[in-house]
Image: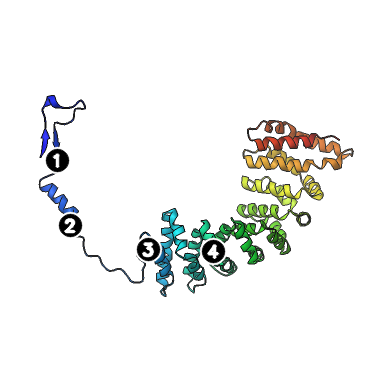
Amino acid sequence: MGYSWGETERGFDKRPNQIIGMPTGAMANNKTIEQHKVRPFLEPKETDRVSVAFLARAPHKFVEKLGNESVNVRREALDTMSRWLLAHPNHKAAQVDAGAIPALTELLKDGDQLVREKSAVALALLGSIHQGVQAMLACKTIEMLLVVINSTETPETRKNAHSCIQLMGNYPEGVEAIVEANGTSRLVEVCTEDVSTEALLSLKCCLQNQNGLNRALQGGACKIMVDALRNESAPVVQFALRNLALLTGPSSAKQEAIQRGAIKPIVVHLRHEAWPVRAAATGALMSIVIDVEGKKQACDHGAIDVLIEMLYDPYLPVVLLGVRCLGNLAECKREVISTPLEGIYNTTFDKALPQLSLLMQSPDRVLAKASRDTADLIKWRP
């Protein structure tokens, strides 16, 4: 079988002079038999394990197995579901449509600790899409999550519960639901007992709502954040500073933070080795020094010299916040003008003008404008 031609009939690409058709012979026959041989008999699987369901049947199979009486079945179903949710982006939406959120919410009350932990993991995965958050709001999952973070669950369970709360906090309706469920007070209590990065991030969601901000201030959140500034963990300090910047929006909160001695540790963190901490400290200081007393204490603790050094920082966010914070402090010129302190003011702030002139030429328009405004405040004369 095949076709051959002579040397003169070969093409310009010098193809071989023979085209072979279907393979024949003993080797070809053995290969064909190997491909079509009968598969061995499949051994039956254990009845308390979940087999992987495919395509449209998978989400419904998982939800069905979540209600099984066997603990092993529920554990295996949660494990398989978590792997399946990570396999493709569309799987999460399909699982939500199959009614997984109410089932997982109920499993947060399960008697088995491992089932509760795996349920929190699955909820955190489903909460990464908008449909999942909407389903959580519909079945009031937030109430169970707040119970989990206040209980004696394992760190992994509480961590995933906090992740769900933070994902819900990405949406305005989610923030409102957290606040209405008294989540602000509960999160403040959690931070009081053991301040952690997860708890601080969850509390930050509540501070974006005016009612949540007021309840946090009434619960003593400002004191907790100031105390957390002395924590040895850099992430804890970073998110405590961010929350403090949000808390000190009202004038009364600024005065409370100043009275509790927040200025000194903030100025110390302006020189922190981690640039996210430096940026967060600058943002918190920028909020507090709007108050006149805050400006005075910041100047007394040497914040101006540190902020001038930050103008040379290699990270753009730190430089931008440093320029803006320096502009807030420069507004105190109105109070020292025509006084003996005016000479000290000019000597201190004029050191920033050369670097501000360079930053005015930055390709970043926001940084260039902020530098121009700060330089104008420093050079202002009545």
Give the CA distance from mark 4 to mark 2: 51 Å
- Residue 27 vs residue 176: left or right? left
Callout 3: helix, strand or loop?
helix
SS for dot 4: helix
Q: What residue sits right under mark 3 in the picture? A: 57
- Mark 2 lies on a secondary structure that is loop
Labels in figure, total? 4
1 or 3: tag closer to the N-terminus = 1
Q: Quick check: 296 left or right of 309?
A: right
Mark 3 or mark 4, which has the lower sequence index? 3
The residue depicted at 43 percent of the width and 57 percent of the height is 91
Q: Is residue 130 visible?
A: yes
The amino acid type of the residue labelled 3 equals: Arg
Q: Residue at x 64, y 57 (%)?
A: 204
- Which is more N-terminal, label 4 or label 1? 1
Q: What's the distance in space between the residues labelled 1 and 2, CA to CA? A: 24 Å
Q: Amino acid at mark 4?
A: Met
Q: Which residue is mark 4?
A: 136
Q: Which callout, 3 or 2, points at the residue further toward the start of the chain?
A: 2
CB atoms of marks 4 and 2 within 8 Å: no
Identify the image quadrant of the N terminus. Answer: top left
Tags 1 and 3 touching, CB below 8 Å: no
Relative horizontal placement of residue 146, taking residue 327 as reference (left or right): left
> Quadrant where the C terminus lies?
top right
Mark 1 secondary-structure assignment? loop
CA separation in Å, label 1 and label 4: 62 Å
Q: Percent from the top left, x then y, of residue 305? A: 74, 40
Q: How many residues crowd mark 1 within 10 Å: few (<14), some (14–19), many (20+)? A: few
The answer to which of marks 1 and 2 sits earlier in the sequence is: 1
